[in-house]
């Protein structure tokens, strides 16, 4: 049984977010699941691939431990607040002295998430 389109889309979104070249992506896919194309994955293979991404250094955005999940959640919260990129950039710079999300540590990202959730709650 092959994967549905939504799960294939998730795989390709993660691939893009992790900035994996096609060769690295296919090597990971083959090493973890035994296939070279996501179209050939079944449900078990999908879970294996997602676990491999989550457990690997690829899942971390930077050397400070920021995870893809944190980055995506921060973006989601900023979108919920209807902040444009410039407003969000100013917020990061003012309160965290960072120019981009990708320069945050894992701990700083957690604080940003909590700050954004509190702002959202009080709007």
Image (cartoon, rainbow, N blue to C red):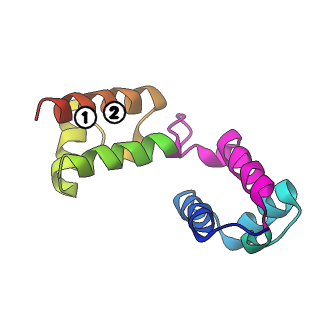
Residue placed most toward the observer, 120 or 61: 120
| Residue at 60% in and 71% down | 5
Question: Principal SS element in the magenta part?
Answer: helix
**Residue 38 place in picture, x, y as percent:** 73, 69
Magenta-tinted stretch: 41-68
Residue placed most toward the observer, 91 or 15: 15
Tell me, yes or no, whether the highlighted magenta stretch contains residue 99. Answer: no
51 vs 3: above or below: above
| Residue at 54% in and 63% down | 13
**Residue 113 place in picture, x, y as percent:** 33, 33
Specify the quadrant that holds the N terminus. bottom right
Q: Which mark is residue 116?
A: 1
Bin the neighbour count of mark 2 within 10 Å (Cα to Cα): few under 14, some 14-19, many 20 and up: many
16 vs 98: above or below: below
Q: Quadrant of residue 10?
A: bottom right
Q: Quadrant of residue 111?
A: top left
**Residue 89 place in picture, x, y as percent:** 23, 48
Bin the neighbour count of mark 1 within 10 Å (Cα to Cα): few under 14, some 14-19, many 20 and up: some
Residue to which mark 2 is pinned: 113
Give the residue at the far right of this rendering. Answer: 34
Residue placed most toward the observer, 11 or 70: 11
Q: Quadrant of residue 92?
A: top left
In the displayed structure, does residue 9 sit left or right of residue 40?
Answer: left
Per the image, label 2 sits on a secondary structure element best described as helix
Badges 2 and 1: C-beta atoms under 8 Å apart? Answer: yes
Specify the quadrant that holds the C terminus. top left
Tell me, yes or no, whether the highlighted magenta stretch contains residue 47. Answer: yes
């Amino acid at each position: 049984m092959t994967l549905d389109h939504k799960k294939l889309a998730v795989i390709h979104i993660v691939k893009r977010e992790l900035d994996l070249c096609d060769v690295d992506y296919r090597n990971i896919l083959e090493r973890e699941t035994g296939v070279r194309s996501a179209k050939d994955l079944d449900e078990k293979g999908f879970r294996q691939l997602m676990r491999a991404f989550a457990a690997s250094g690829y899942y971390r955005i930077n050397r400070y431990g920021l995870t893809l999940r944190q980055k995506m959640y921060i973006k989601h919260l900023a979108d919920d607040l209807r902040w444009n990129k410039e407003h969000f950039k100013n917020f990061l710079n003012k309160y965290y002295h960072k120019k981009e999300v990708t320069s945050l540590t894992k701990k700083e990202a957690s604080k940003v998430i909590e700050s954004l959730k509190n702002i959202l709650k009080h709007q």
